[in-house]
Amino acid sequence: MGRLVVIEGLDGSGKRTLGAALVEAFQRRGAKVAQHAFPRYGESVHADLVSDALHGRLGDVADSVHGMAVLFALDRHGAREQLLRDLENYDIVLVDRYIASNAAYQAARLHQDEHGEIVEWIRQLEVDRLGLPVPDRQLLLRVPVDLAATRAATRDRVRDTYEKDGGLQTRCAALYDGLARIGWLAPWLVLDGRTDQDFDQLSKALVADA
Ligand SMILES: Nc1ncnc2c1ncn2[C@@H]1O[C@H](COP(=O)(O)OP(=O)(O)O)[C@@H](O)[C@H]1O
Ligand SMILES: Cc1cn([C@H]2C[C@H](O)[C@@H](COP(=O)(O)OP(=O)(O)O)O2)c(=O)[nH]c1=O
């Protein structure tokens, strides 16, 4: 059985960059790695609806925090069988954003904290009801909000509703810290995203802590 390792963090924190380097480090170690990223834009109708909502093309759907949470969750549900198969066939299944993204962003939108109602509502929806596999380890790529925003701005694409909302990103950073502190859903490892990571050391720790 493989290990489900999740990368979490703010928009522009460097998750995709970290994921690519970690995959290489796992492979140097001889571990077989499968990669996923959510939302699955271009691959799932639910993710494409999320994109439409976050770019103002879906009426008032984006206003509904619980409605958006359901769309994100259904996107993951569509990948459930593949995730379970990959956990059978690979040593590591590395996922860029997972259930904790929903908890962090939606709680931040409602001005709740890590103990808030929506955090538990999302766990019940995604784990208990939709049967998504629980991570083995969650990596929080922690960077100051302004650094994440600066990095996000370097990318050549239109910012979505969440990315444009500085207050949301600030609350979201606090949510991530809180979720990591209470070990929500699974153990967390907090990485300082301001500095370069020791990928060989990190991949070694993630493979070994089975
Ligand atoms: N450790 C780092 N140091 C400097 N720049 C970085 C670092 N990690 C990522 N970046 C840059 O920041 C931007 C956002 O990174 P990305 O990995 O796409 O973030 P995310 O997937 O979290 O949105 C990219 O332009 C990337 O090249
Ligand atoms: C996966 C996921 C993302 N989000 C948020 C985080 C981001 O602000 C936004 C879009 O995801 P993101 O991974 O940032 O997509 P991209 O980098 O391609 O724009 O959705 C949730 O609120 N819940 C979720 O379950």
Image (tube, rainbow, N blue to C red):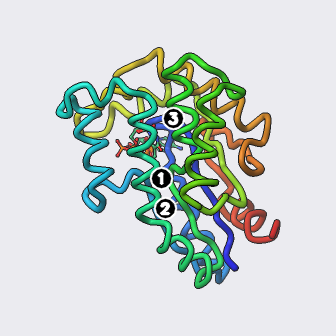
User: Disc 2 to disc 1, how far (Cα)?
Assistant: 5 Å
Residue at mark 2: 20
Say which mark, if any, is on residue 10.
3
Instruction: In the rendered view, tell whether residue 169 sits above or below residue 39.
Output: above
Instruction: In the rendered view, tell whether residue 190 sits above or below residue 199.
Output: above
Amino acid on which the number 1 mark rests in the picture: Thr
Asked whether disc 3 touches disc 2, contact meaning CB atoms under 8 Å apart, the reply is no
Where, by quadrant of the figure, is residue 78 drawn? bottom left
Amino acid on which the number 3 mark rests in the picture: Leu
Characterize the local packing of mark 2: few (<14), some (14-19) or many (20 or more) Cα atoms within 10 angstroms: few
Ligand 2 quarter of the rendering:
top left
Q: Is mark 1 within 8 Å of ligand 1?
A: yes
Q: Is mark 3 within 8 Å of ligand 1?
A: yes
Asked whether disc 2 touches disc 1, contact meaning CB atoms under 8 Å apart, the reply is yes
28 vs 41, left or right, is: right
User: Disc 3 to disc 1, how far (Cα)?
Assistant: 13 Å
